[in-house]
Amino acid sequence: MSTADLSAIYRDYIACLNRQDWSELGRFVAPDVRHNGRAFGLAGYRAMLERDFATIPDLAFDIRLLVTEPPHVAALLGFRCSPRGTFLGLPVEGRTVTFTENVFYTFRDATIVDVRSIIDRGAIEEQIRDASHPA
């Protein structure tokens, strides 16, 4: 698979997520996918995404940086959204927050088999702290 092909597949995957087109998720994610070292499987991965969208109705994935080196993809994803209630253990309570996620993917046969993800929780903590202590 070429770098251009892998980039196109990844962009299509992100578009699928943003459409919440769960019936198409299997085109991009392998049945035995792992997430942060845990065996999730496609059903578990889909359930995680569905929970994310239920908790964050305005969730949208914005690719800010994309690096492909087959069979790997590295992406910096940007978010500006309003999670309901507690998010990542933080009392966001519907406030709009902006943060990024660093994600590394491994592909096999044009599908994602492994995802390693780190969300910038510190950025959210800072925004919550600043909102509760105006200058």
Image (cartoon, rainbow, N blue to C red):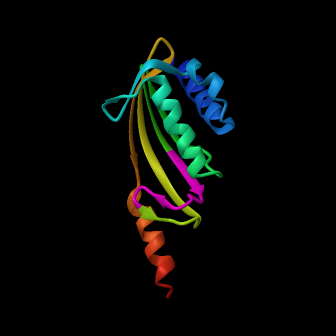
Give the magenta part as a residue range. Answer: 77-89
Residue 79 horizontal side relative to residue 124, left or right: right
User: What's the residue at 43%, 75% (across, down)?
Assistant: 129
User: What's the residue at 59%, 52% (across, down)?
Assistant: 56
Measured from the top left, where is residue 44 in percent x and y? 46, 30
Measured from the top left, where is residue 115 in percent x and y? 40, 31
Which residue, as the protein is rendered here, is positioned at the far bottom?
A: 135
**Number of marks in the image?**
0
In the depicted structure, whether residue 100 falls above or below residue 65: below
Viewer-nearest residue: 98 or 40: 40
User: What's the residue at 48%, 52% (across, down)?
Assistant: 100
In the depicted structure, whether residue 33 falls above or below residue 120: above
As for residue 34 lying within the magenta part, the answer is no
Measured from the top left, where is residue 93 in percent x and y? 54, 66
In the depicted structure, whether residue 100 falls above or below residue 1: below
Residue 97 horizontal side relative to residue 35, left or right: right
Displayed quadrant of residue 40:
top left
Displayed quadrant of residue 26:
top right
Which residue, as the protein is rendered here, is positioned at the far left?
A: 37
Viewer-nearest residue: 86 or 130: 86
Displayed quadrant of residue 23:
top right
User: What's the residue at 59%, 57% (across, down)?
Assistant: 80
Measured from the top left, where is residue 110 in percent x and y? 51, 15
Viewer-nearest residue: 111 or 3: 111
